[in-house]
């Protein structure tokens, strides 16, 4: 988390970061609302404390650049490194599907689920066509667009993305086991639980769980009573294996059962039949009279969110590269390219992630244990007060463990020159003010 400043506006050259307008947070860093002061364009700024054991934002930047031009891929603008923080500037998007799900009383209509499912499947397919797997498919990592793109579903957070084909040979990465669980345990595939190297099938199984979650508001393995994390993982795996697919897809059209059975049956290197999965979604729509008109349950919520963001106005006065907030009584020195900073609030230490440098065409990621999810289902733990047992939420404050084997693989990729760092749009010419930030330990 960035420190709080008196003006609440942090200067990044021709960008302004609103430190009091955080859009989201997770194990990989925080995302803030920002603005380009040259053209007043609204932007998003993802920041990462470089004190983390495995900084990964520059790597994620390379992945995002590699994916540019795809529908539902955020537009990348710039990567700005500093002495203590990294910043990635990209397109401002709307709220996540998880937050919209909450705003709709944690229940989407079948029409909305199918409309979302079709687009979410297309985003995953696009990544796979670029020889990438996401490895953390979940509702939090899909956002709606804004303005003239408000009907488009975007996929984000590529910090765990990884190539599943060898860049030089084009061959699928070999089967491996004994891997750490990477991603979010609630939506992780059975094979991921079993420690098997992830491939395309695992992204699709996570997608299936996400769509089922939208219908029922929960999955059968949420809220289990356990004593520790190891038991939790084992219990969730046991539940996923032993719960009948028909029960997982309860109250949903039978095509959902077929969808889940199909993705679970895929072999490690097998190419999924995306057209078949899309056809299942279309069949459900036809049977239930769905009109494919982008009539999501939450359209009014997105418009309200967008209106709130439009009310954020930069009040600026120029002093070289320094911007003063007119509402604050802060003296600005014309001779300095630096905003005065007050004491910094305690930094939120994010869970370490096993990410290294970035590349346009290379996505080798270290396996991390479960990534924090943003939401918790309070109803699941409301009545559990027994101190002898512990209900550990599968989406709450999970430590990310580094897979040493993958970490070595990433370092080897860097040493071999497979990451084309010069292709990353890096600008560090206007970071003098940021380099002076101090972090409270």
Image (cartoon, rainbow, N blue to C red):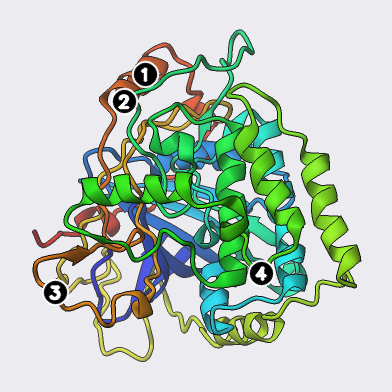
C-alpha span from label 1 to label 4? 44 Å
Res 309 quadrant in image: bottom right
- Secondary element type, mark 1: helix
Relative placement, left or right, of 51 versus 412 is left
Badge 2 marks a residue whose secondary structure is helix
To which residue does mark 3 refer?
A: 386
Q: Marks 2 and 1, Cα distance to the nearest angstrom? A: 5 Å
3D distance between C-alphas at marks 3 and 4: 33 Å
Q: Is residue 395 visible?
A: yes
Check whether the beta carbons of the residues at disc 2 and disc 1 lie within 8 A of each other: yes
Q: CA distance from mark 3 to mark 2?
A: 40 Å
Observer-side mark, 1 or 4, equals 4
Q: How many marks?
A: 4
The residue tagged 1 is: 409
**Where in the figure is residue 76, as x and y percent of width and height?**
59, 50
Proximity of marks 3 and 4: CB atoms separated by less than 8 Å: no
Picture coordinates of residue 265, whole percent (x, y): 63, 33
Task: Name the element at disc 3.
Answer: loop
Q: In which quadrant of the rendered image does the N terminus lie?
A: bottom left
Q: Marks 3 and 2: which is nearer the front?
A: 3
Q: Nearer the viewer, residue 110 or 403?
A: 110
Image point 62% across, 81% down: which residue? 306
- What percent of the width, then of the height, locates residue 258? 72, 47
Question: Does residue 38 show up?
Answer: no
**Label 2 belongs to which residue?**
407
User: SS at mark 4?
Assistant: loop
Judge from the rendering whether residue 402 lies leftward or rightward of residue 240; answer left or right: left
Residue designated by label 4: 251
Does 440 appear above or below 326?
above
Lower position in the chain sequence, tag 3 or tag 2? 3
């Amino acid at each position: 988390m960035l420190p709080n400043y008196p003006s609440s506006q942090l200067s990044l050259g021709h960008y302004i970061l609103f430190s009091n307008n955080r859009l989201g947070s997770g194990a990989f860093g925080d995302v803030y609302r920002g603005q380009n002061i040259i053209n007043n364009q609204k932007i998003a700024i993802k920041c990462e404390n470089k004190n983390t054991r495995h900084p990964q934002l520059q790597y994620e930047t390379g992945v995002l650049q590699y994916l540019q031009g795809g529908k539902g891929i955020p537009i990348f603008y710039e990567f700005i490194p500093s002495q203590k923080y990294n910043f990635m500037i990209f397109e401002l998007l709307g709220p996540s599907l998880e937050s919209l799900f909450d705003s709709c009383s944690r229940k989407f209509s079948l029409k909305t689920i199918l409309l979302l499912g079709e687009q979410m499947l297309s985003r995953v397919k696009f990544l796979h066509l670029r020889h990438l797997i996401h490895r953390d498919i979940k509702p939090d990592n899909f956002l709606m667009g804004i303005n003239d793109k408000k009907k488009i579903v975007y996929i984000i957070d590529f910090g765990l993305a990884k190539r599943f084909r060898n860049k030089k040979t084009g061959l699928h990465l070999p089967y491996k086991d004994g891997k750490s669980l990477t991603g979010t345990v609630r939506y992780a595939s059975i094979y991921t639980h079993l420690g098997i190297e992830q491939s395309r099938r695992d992204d699709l199984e996570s997608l299936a769980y996400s769509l089922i979650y939208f219908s029922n508001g929960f999955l059968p393995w949420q809220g289990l009573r356990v004593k520790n994390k190891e038991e939790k993982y084992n219990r969730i795996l046991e539940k996923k294996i032993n719960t009948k697919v028909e029960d997982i897809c309860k109250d949903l059209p039978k095509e959902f059962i077929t969808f889940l059975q199909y993705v679970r049956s895929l072999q490690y290197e097998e190419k999924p039949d995306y057209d078949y999965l899309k056809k299942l979604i279309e069949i459900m729509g036809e049977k239930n009279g769905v009109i494919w008109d982008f009539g999501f349950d939450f359209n009014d919520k997105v418009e309200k969110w967008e209106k709130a963001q439009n009310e954020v106005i930069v009040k600026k006065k120029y002093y070289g590269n320094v911007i003063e907030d007119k509402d604050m009584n802060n003296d600005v020195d014309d001779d300095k390219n630096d905003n005065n900073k007050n004491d910094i609030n305690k930094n939120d230490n994010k869970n370490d992630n096993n990410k290294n440098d970035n590349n346009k065409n290379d996505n080798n990621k270290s396996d991390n244990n479960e990534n924090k999810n943003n939401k918790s289902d309070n109803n699941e733990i409301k009545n559990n007060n027994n101190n002898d047992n512990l209900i550990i939420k599968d989406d709450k404050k999970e430590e990310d463990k580094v897979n040493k084997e993958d970490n070595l693989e990433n370092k080897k990729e860097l040493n071999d020159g497979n990451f084309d760092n010069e292709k990353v749009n890096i600008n560090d010419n206007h970071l003098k003010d940021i380099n002076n930030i101090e972090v409270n330990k």
